[in-house]
Amino acid sequence: MPANRFRSRSYKRTNKKTPGGVNVLRYKKKKPSKHICAECGAVLHGVPRGRPYEIGKLAKSQKRPNRPFGGNLCPKCARKHFKNEARK
């Protein structure tokens, strides 16, 4: 019987073959949902999915796009925002 915390479906279950040749069930936390644009709701590319301890191991340049509003707005919405700011 698995430990109580592994009985919920918040853990992803994978079968893994150990070096001894035994198949065991491994439990892993699921990946978080994809990041979305704050304005239009489109999926943001270049922003990795991962748990906070995995994201913390990445370099700063790998965590989000290196531009203003990178990781918050998609390129289309960011471009639209810059145009509106310039027109003011």
Image (cartoon, grey):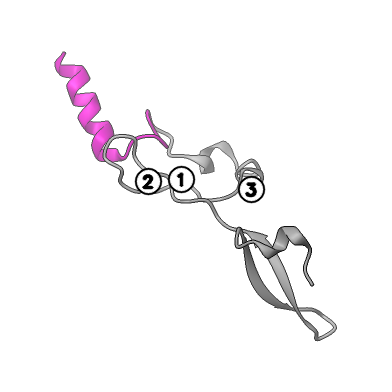
Decide which of tag 2 and tag 3 comes sooner along the chain: 2
Instruction: Report which residue position mark 2 lands on.
Output: 44
Pointer 3: residues within 10 angstroms few (<14), some, or many (20+)? few
Spatial CA distance of label 3 from label 1 is 13 Å
Q: Residue at x 47, y 39 (%)?
A: 64
Furthest-bottom residue in this view? 21
| Circle number at residue 47 | 1
* Disc 1 residue type (three-letter): Val
Q: Quadrant of the N terminus?
A: bottom right
Give the percent coordinates (x, y) of residue 47.
46, 45
> In this picture, which residue range is highlighted in magenta?
68-88
Q: Main secondary structure of the magenta part?
A: helix
The residue identified by callout 3 is 54
> Can residue 81 be found in the magenta stretch?
yes
> Is there a contact, CB below 8 Å, between mark 2 and mark 1?
yes
Q: Residues within 10 Å of mark 1 (few under 14, many from 20)?
A: some
Quadrant position of residue 84? top left
Q: Is residue 57 above or below residue 14?
A: above
The amino acid on which the numbered mark 2 sits, given as a three-letter code, is Leu
Residue 60 locus on image (x, y percent) = 56, 36
Which amino acid is tagged 3? Glu
Quarter holding the C terminus?
Answer: top left
CA distance for labels 2 and 3: 18 Å
**Front-lying residue, 82 or 36:** 36
Label 3, secondary structure: give it.
Answer: helix
Find numbered disc 1 in the image and state the secondary structure of the residue it sits on. loop
